[in-house]
Image: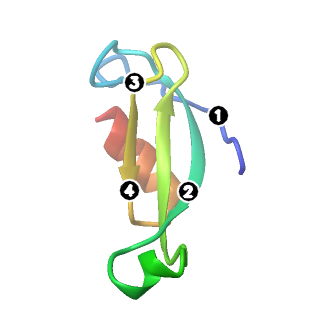
Amino acid sequence: MSHDAHDARDGDRGCPKCGGTETEMDSIATSGTGLSKFFDVQNRTFTVVTCTNCGYSELYRKRSSGNLVDLFLG
């Protein structure tokens, strides 16, 4: 898992829960339904953006990390 910190410089943006402006990003893989779940095949990947202040996290299926941080911080 990789950890990238991002510090927003815009005072109108921030974590939806606490207003924090620093985030970490991780990737997770999950199994879907049907045969992939039966065989424990982790075929769905998500990017997780987490506020480093309060721990609030959102999952995204997109892979463009810069855009995801912008979505998270508003």
Question: In the rendered structure, which disc, 3 or 4, sits on the residue that comes first in sequence?
Answer: 3
Pick whichever, 10 or 14, lies toward us.
14
Q: Secondary structure at mark 1?
A: loop
Q: Secondary structure at mark 2?
A: strand
Disc 1 to disc 4, C-alpha distance: 17 Å
Residue under the image location 48 percent in, 28 percent down:
8
Q: Residues within 10 Å of mark 2 (few under 14, many from 20)?
A: few
Q: x, y (%) of residue 31?
A: 46, 70
Q: Amino acid at mark 4?
A: Tyr
* Residue that badge 4 annotates: 60
Residue at the spot 45% in from the left edge and 14% down from the top edge: 54
- SS for dot 3: loop
Note whether 69 is above or below 38 in the view shown. Answer: above
Q: Amino acid at mark 2?
A: Ile
Few, some or many C-alpha atoms within 10 Å of disc 4 (few <14, some 14-19, many ≥20)?
Answer: some
Alpha carbon distance from label 3 to label 2: 29 Å
- Please name the amino acid that badge 1 sits on: Ala
Q: Are marks 1 and 2 in contact (CB under 8 Å)?
A: no
State how far apart marks 3 and 4 are (Cα): 22 Å
Q: Would you name the residue on which mark 2 appears?
A: 28
Q: Earlier in the sequence, mark 1 or mark 4?
A: 1
**Would you name the residue on which mark 3 appears?**
10
| Position of residue 30 measured from the top left corner of the image (x, y, whole percent) | 48, 64
The residue where tag 1 is placed is 5
**Badge 3 local density, few (<14 within 10 Å), some, or many (20+)?**
few
Quadrant in the picture for residue 24: top right
Q: Position of 30 compared to 6: left or right?
A: left
